[in-house]
Amino acid sequence: MNGKKVLGVIYDFAEIIMTAVLSVILVFSFGFKTSVVNGNSMNDTLNNGDTVIISAVNKTVNYGDVVVISQPNALNKVLIKRVIATGGQTVTFDYENKRVLVDGKVLTEPYLPEKMYFTPSMSGNFTVPEGQIFVMGDNRNNSTDSRDPLIGFIDVRYVVGKVVYRFGDSHFFEKGI
Protein backbone atom coordinates (compact mmCIF):
# COMPACT_ATOMS: atom_id res chain seq x y z
CA MET A 1 0.00 0.00 0.00
CA ASN A 2 1.34 3.39 -0.86
CA GLY A 3 1.37 6.42 1.46
CA LYS A 4 -1.67 8.07 -0.10
CA LYS A 5 -3.85 4.98 0.36
CA VAL A 6 -2.77 4.61 3.99
CA LEU A 7 -3.57 8.27 4.67
CA GLY A 8 -6.94 7.85 2.91
CA VAL A 9 -7.82 4.84 5.08
CA ILE A 10 -6.75 6.70 8.25
CA TYR A 11 -8.78 9.75 7.21
CA ASP A 12 -11.88 7.62 6.49
CA PHE A 13 -11.53 5.81 9.81
CA ALA A 14 -11.10 9.10 11.73
CA GLU A 15 -14.13 10.55 9.95
CA ILE A 16 -16.28 7.56 10.97
CA ILE A 17 -15.10 7.76 14.59
CA MET A 18 -15.70 11.53 14.78
CA THR A 19 -19.19 11.17 13.27
CA ALA A 20 -20.06 8.44 15.77
CA VAL A 21 -18.76 10.47 18.73
CA LEU A 22 -20.58 13.60 17.58
CA SER A 23 -23.81 11.62 17.11
CA VAL A 24 -23.61 10.18 20.63
CA ILE A 25 -22.91 13.64 22.08
CA LEU A 26 -25.90 15.13 20.26
CA VAL A 27 -28.27 12.33 21.25
CA PHE A 28 -27.28 12.50 24.92
CA SER A 29 -27.28 16.30 24.97
CA PHE A 30 -30.73 16.80 23.51
CA GLY A 31 -32.68 13.54 23.56
CA PHE A 32 -31.48 11.35 26.39
CA LYS A 33 -29.65 11.73 29.67
CA THR A 34 -28.35 9.31 32.25
CA SER A 35 -28.77 9.30 36.00
CA VAL A 36 -27.73 7.09 38.89
CA VAL A 37 -30.31 6.01 41.48
CA ASN A 38 -29.41 7.36 44.90
CA GLY A 39 -31.32 5.60 47.68
CA ASN A 40 -33.84 2.83 48.19
CA SER A 41 -37.15 4.63 47.66
CA MET A 42 -37.80 2.92 44.30
CA ASN A 43 -36.90 -0.65 45.36
CA ASP A 44 -37.59 -3.20 43.82
CA THR A 45 -38.18 -1.37 40.54
CA LEU A 46 -34.90 0.54 40.75
CA ASN A 47 -32.13 -0.11 43.25
CA ASN A 48 -29.50 2.11 44.79
CA GLY A 49 -26.65 2.50 42.30
CA ASP A 50 -28.64 1.51 39.19
CA THR A 51 -27.91 3.64 36.13
CA VAL A 52 -30.93 4.70 34.09
CA ILE A 53 -31.46 6.38 30.73
CA ILE A 54 -33.97 9.20 30.72
CA SER A 55 -35.91 10.37 27.69
CA ALA A 56 -35.93 14.16 27.70
CA VAL A 57 -37.76 14.37 24.38
CA ASN A 58 -41.37 14.11 25.55
CA LYS A 59 -41.84 15.56 29.03
CA THR A 60 -45.60 14.97 29.17
CA VAL A 61 -46.12 12.80 32.24
CA ASN A 62 -48.93 10.42 33.09
CA TYR A 63 -49.86 8.09 35.89
CA GLY A 64 -47.32 5.30 36.25
CA ASP A 65 -44.39 7.07 34.61
CA VAL A 66 -41.12 6.89 36.53
CA VAL A 67 -39.57 10.34 36.30
CA VAL A 68 -36.39 12.14 37.27
CA ILE A 69 -37.04 15.42 39.09
CA SER A 70 -34.64 18.32 39.61
CA GLN A 71 -36.97 20.51 41.70
CA PRO A 72 -35.10 22.04 44.65
CA ASN A 73 -35.99 20.21 47.86
CA ALA A 74 -34.93 19.86 51.47
CA LEU A 75 -32.97 16.70 50.62
CA ASN A 76 -30.78 18.65 48.16
CA LYS A 77 -30.82 15.86 45.60
CA VAL A 78 -32.35 14.82 42.31
CA LEU A 79 -35.34 12.53 42.86
CA ILE A 80 -36.55 9.48 40.93
CA LYS A 81 -40.21 8.71 41.67
CA ARG A 82 -43.38 7.31 40.13
CA VAL A 83 -46.18 9.66 39.03
CA ILE A 84 -49.33 8.90 41.02
CA ALA A 85 -51.54 11.84 40.00
CA THR A 86 -51.43 14.88 37.74
CA GLY A 87 -52.98 18.36 37.90
CA GLY A 88 -56.62 18.39 38.97
CA GLN A 89 -56.67 14.85 40.33
CA THR A 90 -57.33 14.00 43.98
CA VAL A 91 -55.21 11.50 45.91
CA THR A 92 -56.80 9.73 48.90
CA PHE A 93 -55.19 7.28 51.32
CA ASP A 94 -57.37 4.39 52.50
CA TYR A 95 -55.88 3.75 55.95
CA GLU A 96 -57.98 0.72 56.74
CA ASN A 97 -57.08 -1.23 53.59
CA LYS A 98 -53.61 0.28 53.10
CA ARG A 99 -54.15 1.48 49.56
CA VAL A 100 -54.09 4.63 47.45
CA LEU A 101 -57.01 6.03 45.45
CA VAL A 102 -56.92 8.64 42.70
CA ASP A 103 -60.22 10.31 41.91
CA GLY A 104 -61.93 7.59 43.95
CA LYS A 105 -60.39 4.66 42.03
CA VAL A 106 -58.05 2.22 43.76
CA LEU A 107 -54.63 2.10 42.11
CA THR A 108 -53.42 -1.29 40.90
CA GLU A 109 -49.76 -1.33 41.85
CA PRO A 110 -48.11 -4.72 41.24
CA TYR A 111 -44.65 -3.13 41.45
CA LEU A 112 -44.92 -2.44 45.21
CA PRO A 113 -42.66 -4.70 47.30
CA GLU A 114 -45.09 -4.59 50.26
CA LYS A 115 -48.29 -2.94 51.47
CA MET A 116 -47.85 0.64 52.57
CA TYR A 117 -48.38 1.58 56.18
CA PHE A 118 -49.76 5.00 56.94
CA THR A 119 -48.76 7.74 59.31
CA PRO A 120 -51.00 10.45 60.78
CA SER A 121 -49.28 13.08 58.60
CA MET A 122 -50.99 11.56 55.57
CA SER A 123 -54.55 12.39 56.53
CA GLY A 124 -57.16 13.75 54.17
CA ASN A 125 -57.28 14.20 50.44
CA PHE A 126 -54.63 15.88 48.31
CA THR A 127 -55.83 17.71 45.21
CA VAL A 128 -52.95 18.23 42.81
CA PRO A 129 -52.73 21.81 41.48
CA GLU A 130 -52.64 22.30 37.71
CA GLY A 131 -49.10 22.19 36.33
CA GLN A 132 -47.95 19.92 39.15
CA ILE A 133 -47.75 16.21 39.88
CA PHE A 134 -47.97 13.97 42.95
CA VAL A 135 -45.15 11.41 43.09
CA MET A 136 -44.33 8.47 45.33
CA GLY A 137 -41.51 5.97 45.60
CA ASP A 138 -42.33 2.31 44.92
CA ASN A 139 -40.80 1.40 48.28
CA ARG A 140 -43.58 3.35 50.01
CA ASN A 141 -42.47 2.54 53.54
CA ASN A 142 -39.03 3.99 52.87
CA SER A 143 -39.67 6.94 50.56
CA THR A 144 -39.65 10.69 51.03
CA ASP A 145 -42.03 11.89 48.34
CA SER A 146 -45.07 14.11 47.72
CA ARG A 147 -46.65 12.87 50.96
CA ASP A 148 -43.94 14.73 52.85
CA PRO A 149 -43.93 18.55 53.12
CA LEU A 150 -40.16 18.42 52.45
CA ILE A 151 -41.04 17.43 48.87
CA GLY A 152 -44.72 18.17 48.28
CA PHE A 153 -46.19 18.58 44.82
CA ILE A 154 -43.73 18.68 41.93
CA ASP A 155 -43.86 21.45 39.33
CA VAL A 156 -43.83 19.72 35.92
CA ARG A 157 -41.19 22.19 34.71
CA TYR A 158 -38.72 20.37 36.97
CA VAL A 159 -39.28 16.96 35.37
CA VAL A 160 -36.00 16.16 33.63
CA GLY A 161 -37.57 13.24 31.79
CA LYS A 162 -38.99 9.72 31.98
CA VAL A 163 -36.92 6.68 32.81
CA VAL A 164 -36.89 4.48 29.70
CA TYR A 165 -34.08 2.00 30.33
CA ARG A 166 -32.29 0.52 33.33
CA PHE A 167 -28.79 -0.91 33.14
CA GLY A 168 -28.02 -3.89 35.29
CA ASP A 169 -30.60 -6.39 34.23
CA SER A 170 -30.82 -4.38 31.01
CA HIS A 171 -34.43 -3.88 30.20
CA PHE A 172 -36.63 -1.19 28.76
CA PHE A 173 -39.10 0.48 31.08
CA GLU A 174 -42.82 0.10 30.77
CA LYS A 175 -45.64 1.34 32.96
CA GLY A 176 -46.27 -0.96 35.87
CA ILE A 177 -42.70 -2.25 36.01
Image: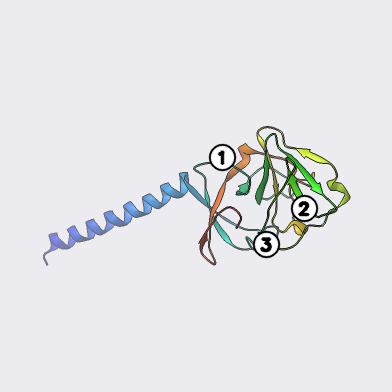
Q: Looking at numbered disc 1 in the image, what kind of residue is underneath it?
A: Thr
Q: Residue 10: where, in percent of width, then height? A: 23, 60
In the image, is 98 to the left or to the right of 55? Answer: right
Q: Secondary structure at mark 1?
A: loop
Q: Earlier in the sequence, mark 1 or mark 3?
A: 3
Quadrant where the C terminus lies? bottom right
Q: Which mark is residue 99?
A: 2
Per the image, the residue denoted by label 3 is 43
Q: Residue 111: where, in percent of width, then height? A: 66, 59
Q: Looking at numbered disc 2 in the image, what kind of residue is underneath it?
A: Arg
Residue name at image x 25 percent, y 59 percent: 13
Q: CA distance from mark 1 to mark 3?
A: 24 Å
How was this image coloured? rainbow
Per the image, the residue denoted by label 1 is 60
Q: CA distance from mark 1 to mark 2?
A: 26 Å
Q: Residues within 10 Å of mark 1 (few under 14, many from 20)?
A: few
Quadrant where the N terminus lies? bottom left
Q: Looking at numbered disc 3 in the image, what kind of residue is underneath it?
A: Asn
Nearer-the-camera pick, 93 or 51: 93
Q: Residue 129: name its quadrant.
A: top right
Q: CA distance from mark 3 to mark 2?
A: 18 Å
In the image, is 12 to the left or to the right of 63? Answer: left
Q: Residues within 10 Å of mark 2 (few under 14, many from 20)?
A: some
Q: Secondary structure at mark 2?
A: strand
Residue name at image x 75 percent, y 49 percent: 100
